Amino acid sequence: MNAGYVLDDVTIGELGRGDLVVANLVAALDEHAVRMSVPAIALAVAQHTLSEAQADAVHGMIHRLEHVRLEPIASTEDVLRLSAVSVQLTEQQDMAAAHTVAVARYLGFPILAADLKRWEPVRALVPWELDIYEISG
């Protein structure tokens, strides 16, 4: 696999709420062996908007789909990458976005977003070009 996407917190939330467009896209990408990365902090933030059953559905998807991977903060290098992004977002305090951007930059993958407006303030603060694709139905 040399192609992939990073799912943002809004997309993860929509997936948990059963948005068919998002669910069908994730299933199709998985079927075509396209890696989808789920930043752990984005998952944690998305879970705050979900019921327990919806959160369980997202966790099940992460475990069942072969090409969906949870991206933890498991090494000092992960912490340094996250820190390099989060320092840019200090006025925003958006750790879900910071982890999503850190993972996307590290893997060289674009971000899949259910709502591009979520990314406008982040784009205004970071010094990097963000490659973001909006999921639309």
Image: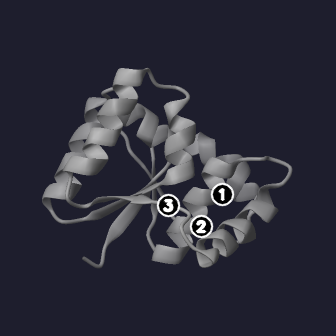
Q: Where is residue 91 in the image (x, y as percent from the top left)?
A: 86, 49
Q: Position of residue 136 (x, y in %)?
A: 37, 40
Instruction: Using the image as rendered, state which of residue 29 and residue 136 is in the foreground.
Output: 29
The residue wearing badge 2 is 102
Q: Is mark 2 on a helix, strand or loop?
A: helix
Q: Is residue 46 above or below residue 32?
A: above
Q: Is residue 77 left or right of residue 92?
A: left
Q: What element carries label 3?
A: loop
Residue 17 at least partly seen: no
* Mark 3–mark 2 distance (CA, rounded to whole Å): 11 Å
**In the depicted structure, whether residue 5 falls above or below residue 65:** below
Badge 1 element: helix
Residue 72's tag is: 3
When asked about the image quadrant of residue 31, the answer is bottom left
User: In which quadrant will I find the N terminus?
Assistant: bottom left
Circle 1 residue:
98
* Label 1 with label 2: CB-CB less than 8 Å: yes
Query: How far is mark 1 from mark 3, CA to CA?
Result: 13 Å
Crowd band around label 3 with a 10 angstrom C-alpha radius: few (<14), some (14–19), many (20+): some
